[in-house]
Image: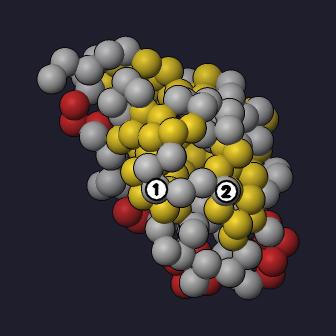
Amino acid sequence: PKMKDSTLGAHMNGLAMPLDKVQDEAFASGALGSGVAIEPTEGALYAPADAKVDNVFDTKHAISLVTDDGAELLIHIGINTVELGGKHFDVKVAEGDTVKKGQLLTTFDMEAIKAAGYPCTTPMIVCNTDDYKAVDALRTEGEIKAGEDILALRG
């Protein structure tokens, strides 16, 4: 199917960074899809677009969304944080929920996660990148606020 052009908002408050700077090969290499990452300045994850919650991982560190425009997103809070087994994460939504852009999805204890030895860098990946002509990060450095344009999807 032909995809629509759409723009995703930033999924958290923090510092924007290119995906290839993420300290995780699967994300950095683009193997999972194109996207962008944010180094958070607060422990909160927000919906980047109006979407349906496709999956909340048992370990609470990641969530997948399907936007109303058909983008399949994976948002992964922190690096290797699956190893925390859900500790320090509080998910506010459930699988099947409909969410609005800017809605709070998850809160997390940044200090505790960092103290446990994990970066809080949070990639947002477009898993169906191949359905698009291009997925362009609009911001890859500097401060960004949740909801500000960060990814352009070109149908």
Q: Which amino acid does label 1 sit on?
A: Glu
Residue 43 in the image: above or below residue 36: below
Numbered mark located on residue 95 in the image? 1
Q: What residue type is labelled 2?
A: Lys
Q: Which of 131 and 50 is in front in this view?
A: 50
Q: How far apart are marks 1 and 2 (CA)?
A: 11 Å
Query: Residue sitting at 56 percent across and 38 percent down?
Result: 99
- Residue bearing the label numbered 2: 92
Lateral position of residue 140 relative to residue 110, left or right: left
Query: Residue sitting at 61 percent across and 23 percent down?
Result: 149
Residue 34 in the image: above or below residue 26: above
Percent coordinates x, y for residue 125 in the rendering = 43, 46
For label 2, the crowd category at 10 Å Cα-Cα, with few meaning under 14, some 14 to 19 and many 20 or more, is: few
Lateral position of residue 142 relative to residue 136, left or right: right
Element under disc 1: loop
Q: In which quarter of the image is the N terminus?
A: top left
